[in-house]
Image (cartoon, helix red, strand yellow):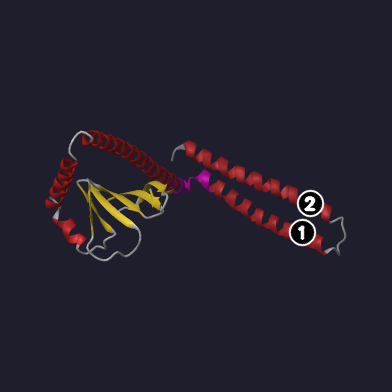
Amino acid sequence: MNEQRKIDSKRKVNEEIRILTKYNEVDNATIGRFRTMSKNDSFVQTQLTKMEKQITERNAKIEELNHRLTKLDAGELDEEIEADLKRISFEISEKSKVTTLKKKLETELKNQDKKMSKEYNDKERKNDKVDKQWYYKSAHKHFEHANDTLPEYITRDLNKMPCNTGYSWKGVYFFGKRPENSNVYTVTENRKGMKIIYRWSKDFNNVYHKEGKGEEILISSAQRRKVETKNHSIDV
């Protein structure tokens, strides 16, 4: 094992011994003061019993730590220390991967939102110049194309899914054919090696990422707000 790691481990043990010893010194000094008080005072007796018990427990811990120092010097804990270091390194690595992936997806979603916003604005400007009927035909044509190219597994799944759950395919949302089972809507977009899951209700809009069979990771969350009009309110 790396000698520096052994030195670090011994330093931590010695520091713990120092702290426990300091606590014992403080408690022993307090016990000395309490012993000059009335022996019939129940509070004094309770505190004396409590501190004596704590000192005994600390002494046992100090003895255990000194035994650990002996084992460290003899190299008997090398494998344990290496295993702890590997475990800690793995946990740090996994947390770093999740953080990096989350940031990457947040950036991707922001860029996607910008792109969609630009495309939408471009379409709006074009629609001001052309007959609205052309726009409706174009949208219908896009839907027909998406519907005609819908993968078989999506069609099969939609037959079994409630109508508040579905898939996103070529920018079109397809929902299940069975009765809804909640007031929460969920749409899954399959991408290479991962899924983007859009989930919303009248109160919130959430976006999740799921890689393989892993757990869903929340990427963004937004509270939906109500816009009051003259006659009613609208969720946005």
Residue wearing tag 2: 30
Q: Foreground: 202 or 107? A: 202
- Check residue 80 for magenta coloring: yes
In the foreground, 80 or 164? 164
- Work out whether 43 lies above or below 116: below
Mark 2 vs mark 1: which is more N-terminal? 2
Is residue 127 found inside the magenta-colored segment of the image? no
**In the displayed image of the protein, which residue is found farthest to the left?**
148
The numbered dot on residue 128 is: none
Left or right? Give the position of 108 relative to 45: left
Q: Residue at x 66, y 57 (%)?
A: 57
Would you say 127 lies left or right of 78 here? left
Rendering coords of residue 66 (x, y %): 60, 48
Residue range in magenta is 71-82
SS under mark 2: helix
Residue that badge 1 annotates: 47
Q: Mark 2 belongs to which amino acid? A: Thr
In percent of the image, x 27 and y 52: which residue is there?
Answer: 188
Q: Assess whether mark 1 and mark 2 are in contact (beta carbons under 8 angstroms).
A: yes
What residue do we see at 16% from left, 43% from top? 133
Q: SS for tag 1? A: helix
Q: x and y percent of residue 63 in the render? A: 62, 52
Q: Which quadrant is the N terminus positioned in?
A: top left
Residue 126 image point, x, y percent? 21, 34
Badge 1 crowding class, 10 Å Cα cut-off, few under 14, some 14 to 19, many 20 or more, is some
